[in-house]
Image (cartoon, rainbow, N blue to C red):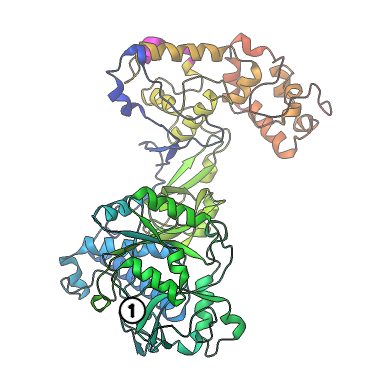
């Protein structure tokens, strides 16, 4: 079925039944946004007469896509292998193959899918559900030759404000800190007898590479400490970026650049000056959080105290996250870390995210989404627009459940199919768009594209099989402020009238009576009277408004009044060359205008217009414009 999407509060008439008991004197109008384009947008409406144009995969959002368990298990395995490849590149080579938002969503999805298939469904994969770890392990590298004195734990990344609030609620009577989540490479610095003895890359959290030679070249990092006590610091080596604003500048590949520098055998003095260090843990330091901050500053690591704030409620966390996202910082950051100031002794740490600290990323600029189905909407002018329906995801702190694929050609170019996992980003910081298929579905559904030749600017002028979407779009335009300006009657109102069998012609509404309207669920006497009044007011619109409401091809504002001043018979007889004598009307538009006035259905509709419509407007009207209409054309026909 061709799926038409109607915007905003699109309440189809069956959905209005709950309003039927309302006081008729206070009927709520069936609201819908004014339509200013060629496609009515919103809830998907199905029609038994329509061609099949919905490509779908049925799946529980918490479970892998697939109609059978083996296919779901294949989807989980494919996702796990992709995560392993990204982890290996990130932790061992310092390469970020996908945006953080894509990776984080993939990791959360892996956990959800794995939980869905536990415990019995993992056995066909040769896995022991009881022994299988609950998180993707960080891969080890053959170059990970040094053991961390204390395990690097990593962090669980919470997806949204609600999850952060729930975590905060579990931290009763705990002093909590918040810090920027510095975007660099993790390292353990081991000081013995006041000297930097070893620098170890994170690796898998238990062992890592020997970075001592390179780190000793970093001028901003203390090589000597004013204490003989053992000091082991965990933190982030970052690219120094004075005045960096994350919301404006993004990540600028800061982590990759630092990782590349540290993986060199020798670090130049110039490159070393570009690297800073942020200490986020001192596993063998004082138990008191306040003492740790003070002593870190005394040892020469003042950034930790400078960028640590105490928080006690969600609103404060939200405030600091937003502030650090938009404020100048000396480094790139990709979120915030919330942690208890008092944590367990370092000897008890494990190479797995702890319960006493979490991360909340900044609004994702990209994310990974599962395509559940692809609908094809049809607009007033016959334009077909494929719409990918998604398992809802957060993008820039907003939930996205569908995204336009633009055109049939662009859909074919992207080759997006139900079950695919796709990279989703924002175009122009506001409009979600699919960039590419990241993990194709297995197997992939064949695509059967709708017939683009069936629909055009003059198709579906009446309600015929396969025409419901375009016909509704025409009615929505006709009643909008760009057409006949029927106050209180929007897309949902027209859908109710069509579904009740009261309208199957663009002008059937002219014959309706209030008693007929009151048979619609949710339409009482007051609403019926309001609709009748709107219909009667529309009858008094001038001819130009009627022509535009019926789908007249666009004519430049400056010449519209003069171009349409002739009688209808003269407009029908005007040739393409005659239309082109008006400034701004070229060969394509003139051909469209001739086709419009020669269409027999349009001709019949125009012949039935009320007497008031034969009067040309004395002032410009119709489609919105910021310019005034000229009183004479540039050239005469």
Query: In terms of depth relative to the viewer, which is nearer, 36 or 419?
Result: 36
- Disc 1, SS: loop
Residue appearing at x 43%, y 41% in the figure: 2
Report whether 163 appears left or right of 99: left
Say if 207 sits above or below 500 in the image.
below
Circle 1 is placed at which residue position?
Answer: 205
**In this orientation, does residue 97 appear?**
no
**Tally of marks:** 1
Percent from the top left, x then y, of residue 315? Answer: 37, 48
Q: Residues within 10 Å of mark 1 (few under 14, many from 20)?
A: many
Query: In terms of depth relative to the viewer, which is nearer, 528 or 255?
Result: 255
Percent from the top left, x then y, of residue 418? Answer: 38, 56
Q: Identify the image quadrant of residue 289.
A: bottom left
Residue appearing at x 20%, y 74% in the figure: 127
**In this orientation, does residue 201 appear?**
yes
- In the picture, which quadrant includes the C terminus? top right
User: Which secondary structure is most common in the magenta stretch?
Assistant: helix
Q: Which span of residues is magenta-colored?
A: 510-517
Residue appearing at x 74%, y 18% in the figure: 566
User: Residue 31 lies in magenta, yes or no?
Assistant: no
User: Residue 515 lies in magenta, yes or no?
Assistant: yes
Say if 626 sits above or below 422 in the image.
above
Residue appearing at x 40%, y 65% in the figure: 103
Q: Identify the image quadrant of residue 308.
A: bottom left
Query: In terms of depth relative to the viewer, which is nearer, 198 or 342?
Result: 342
The residue most toward the right is 635
Report whether 607 appears left or right of 110: right
Report whether 451 appears left or right of 343: right
Say if 627 sits above or below 192 in the image.
above
């Amino acid at each position: 079925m061709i799926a038409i999407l109607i915007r905003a509060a699109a309440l189809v008439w069956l959905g209005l039944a709950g309003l039927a008991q309302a006081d008729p004197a206070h009927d709520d109008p069936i609201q819908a946004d004014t339509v200013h384009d060629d496609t009515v947008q919103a809830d998907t409406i199905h029609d038994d007469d329509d061609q099949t144009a919905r490509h779908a995969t049925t799946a529980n959002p918490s479970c892998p896509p697939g109609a059978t368990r083996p296919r779901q298990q294949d989807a989980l395995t494919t996702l796990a292998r992709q995560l392993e490849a990204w982890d290996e590149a990130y932790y061992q080579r310092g390469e970020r193959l996908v945006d953080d938002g894509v990776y984080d969503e993939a990791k959360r999805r892996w956990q959800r899918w794995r939980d869905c298939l536990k415990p019995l469904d993992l056995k066909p994969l040769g896995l022991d559900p009881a022994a299988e770890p609950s998180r993707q392990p960080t891969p080890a590298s053959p170059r990970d030759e040094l053991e961390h004195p204390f395990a690097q734990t990593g962090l669980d990344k919470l997806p949204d404000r609600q999850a952060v609030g729930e975590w905060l609620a579990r931290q009763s009577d705990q002093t909590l800190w918040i810090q920027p989540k510095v975007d660099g490479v993790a390292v353990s610095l081991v000081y013995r007898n006041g000297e930097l003895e070893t620098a170890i890359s994170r690796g898998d959290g238990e062992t890592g590479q020997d970075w001592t030679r390179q780190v000793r070249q970093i001028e901003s990092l203390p090589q000597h400490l004013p204490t003989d006590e053992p000091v082991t610091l965990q933190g982030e080596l970052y690219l120094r970026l004075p005045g960096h604003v994350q919301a404006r500048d993004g990540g600028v590949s800061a982590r990759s650049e630092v990782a590349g520098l540290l993986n060199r055998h020798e670090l130049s003095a110039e490159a070393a000056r570009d690297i800073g260090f942020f200490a986020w843990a001192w596993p063998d330091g004082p138990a008191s959080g306040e003492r740790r901050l003070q002593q870190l500053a005394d040892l020469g690591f003042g950034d930790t105290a400078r960028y640590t704030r105490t928080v006690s409620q969600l609103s404060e966390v939200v405030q600091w996250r937003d502030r650090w996202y938009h404020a100048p910082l000396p480094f790139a950051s990709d979120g915030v870390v919330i942690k208890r100031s008092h944590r367990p002794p370092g000897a008890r740490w494990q190479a797995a995210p702890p319960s006493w600290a979490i991360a909340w990323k900044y609004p994702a600029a990209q994310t990974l989404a599962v395509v559940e189905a692809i609908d094809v909407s049809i607009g007033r002018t016959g334009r077909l627009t494929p719409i990918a329906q998604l398992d809802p995801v957060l993008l820039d702190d907003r939930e996205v459940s569908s995204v336009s694929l633009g055109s049939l050609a662009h859909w074919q170019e992207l080759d997006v199919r139900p079950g695919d996992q796709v990279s989703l980003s924002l175009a122009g910081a506001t409009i979600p768009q699919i960039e590419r298929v990241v993990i194709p579905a297995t197997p992939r559904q064949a695509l059967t594209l709708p017939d683009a030749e069936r629909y055009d600017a003059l198709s579906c002028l009446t309600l015929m099989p396969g025409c419901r979407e375009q016909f509704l779009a025409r009615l929505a335009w006709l009643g909008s402020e760009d057409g006949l300006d029927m106050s209180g009657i929007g897309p949902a109102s027209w859908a109710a009238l069509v579904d009740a069998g009261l309208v199957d012609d663009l002008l059937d509404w002219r014959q309706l009576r209030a008693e007929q309207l009151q048979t619609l669920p949710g339409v009482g006497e007051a609403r019926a009277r309001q609709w009748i009044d709107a219909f009667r007011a529309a009858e008094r619109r001038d001819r130009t408004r009627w022509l535009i409401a019926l789908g007249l091809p666009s004519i430049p504002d400056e010449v519209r009044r003069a171009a349409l001043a002739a009688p209808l018979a003269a407009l029908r007889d005007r040739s393409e060359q005659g239309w082109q004598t008006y400034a701004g009307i070229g060969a394509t538009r003139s051909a469209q205008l001739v086709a419009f006035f020669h269409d027999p259905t349009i001709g019949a509709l125009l012949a039935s217009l009320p007497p008031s419509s034969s009067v040309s407007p004395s002032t410009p009207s119709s489609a919105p414009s910021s310019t005034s209409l000229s009183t004479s054309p540039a050239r005469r026909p």
